[in-house]
Amino acid sequence: MGVAVMRRKLLILEDDRTLRRELEVMFSDLEVTATRTSDETLGTVRRTEPDVVLFDLGVEREPAQAAQGLELLRQILNLTPDVKLIAMIEHDARELAVAAVGLGATDFYYKPLDRSVLGIVVRRALRIRELEEENWQLRERTGGMALEGIIGVSDSMRSLGRAIEKVAPTKATVLLLGESGTGKELLARALHQLSGRSDKPFVAINCAAIPETLLESELFGYEKGAFTGAAKRTAGKLEAADGGTVFLDEIGEMPPALQAKLLRVVQERTVERIGSRVPLALDVRIVCATNRDLQTLMGQGTFREDLFYRLSEVTIRVPPLRERQGDSLLVAQFALQQISAGFGKPTRGLAPDAIRAIQAHRWPGNVRELENRIKGAVIMAEGAVVTAGDLGLEDPGDDPEYLNLRVARRRAEAQAVRQALAVARGNLSRAAELLGVTRPTLYDLLGKHAIDSAQFVRPAGPVPESAAGQRVTGAAAESDSSGQNTKLGE
């Protein structure tokens, strides 16, 4: 017996019987409910909790009807804040569309009906709803775990989570490598919470934020009278973390003299306060992080090689946000809800232009930059949704294709063909072999994507050994005679 697949729910409010029936047929793969009046719509929303509501907002030249439509929009969002609303309006009703989005509508659609465009708009809203649900499901799965606060469903973040779970129960020292703002301290806390030391202290210290003259006393502590101002015996951060975990952020900034003392701590598991010659036994796990290239620093002689190998028993690379496909929107949605609640703001979600801008931005400052932009937008936004302008980002334009799987496959397929031709220097037989397709199929692909193989022909020479015998892999797809897409090599 097969497993039933839950169909997404679409509610259509349209008083035109013919158009209503046409929309029902158009979205027959969804669980569609159609209504004719505002009261009937509100009752249906309460009863069915649809994923998307598609409704006729009226026309600007009939203010009473338009006001009634906007009021219905408010009432629907009060009942189900997570629902995605798509307003259908006349072409000359731009101000009405802006008002609808400002109140919380996800998108709008200009009449008359264009089946392909409306289909894209509705599918996009459904996909946004699915991404939000994945976000909340992820939070539910990790709510009682140490990975709480780390949001992501990309392959790179799933791999990172598995690595953290594997190494956490061990005693290995861990080195976290990643750009600034990627959440390295959150991962260090996850390592601590998933270890047998979770009931002991977690002590974090930023080696770049403390002056060199104070860093030694902060780390190792000091005896009374050890230096001017040392009025009493004081334990250092390492001693305070005894039994638990110490997180040394920006370890690449640690002065060479302190690196030697830290090496002794790691090797002998003892610590000596400044002004004392009595070593104190220390049971502490060390987790380090840096955004610097330690290999380069070792080559320059500013970071000890022996310390590097002691601290990097396990090295984990934290991917930047731009490499986490699909995560930026999830992180933004999560941050928006948390920050809105913290400020007591009624912000409901992200406007379509904000969603496009978030997914298009490169995020050089990673999650920290995203959170800061969301925080500023929540404070400054005047409407019920955050726009690209509120975020200080440019709208890349209305590209309804960015969530279209067929388009993504077509682009990847074209890229794979170009890559194979480049490796094969324009030799079609060799390119077909690399792609794992027949030569006639390759001809079809060249025509399909308007690719001129002659531009890849170069002077004869050996194919690079690293490319020989390897297939071009990825999201490329081979077209069969029916026009459908299947993965290469399957």
Image: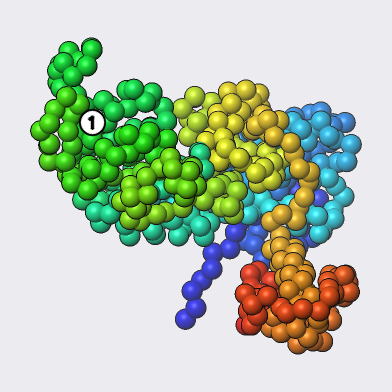
46 horizontally vs 201: left or right: right
Where does the image place residue 23, in percent across and percent down from the top left? Answer: 76, 58
State the residue in front, 488 or 26.
488
> Residue type at mark 1?
Phe
Please, is residue 456 above or below residue 248 in the view? below
State the residue in front, 242 or 55.
242
Where does the image place residue 418, in percent across and percent down from the top left? Answer: 77, 70
State the residue in front, 283 or 134.
283
Q: Looking at the image, which residue is at 48% across and 43% down?
A: 300
Residue under numbered circle 1: 220
How many badges with numbers are in the image?
1
Where does the image place residue 469, in percent across and percent down from the top left? Answer: 64, 82
Label 1 crowd bin: few (<14), some (14–19), many (20+), radius 10 Å? many
Find residue 411 and report its image quarter: bottom right
Please, is residue 485 above or below residue 437 in the view? above
Please, is residue 78 above or below residue 41 in the view? above
Residue 46 visible, this angle:
no
* Element class at badge 1: helix
Where does the image place residue 240, in percent across and percent down from the top left? Answer: 20, 32
Find residue 372 and report its image quarter: top right
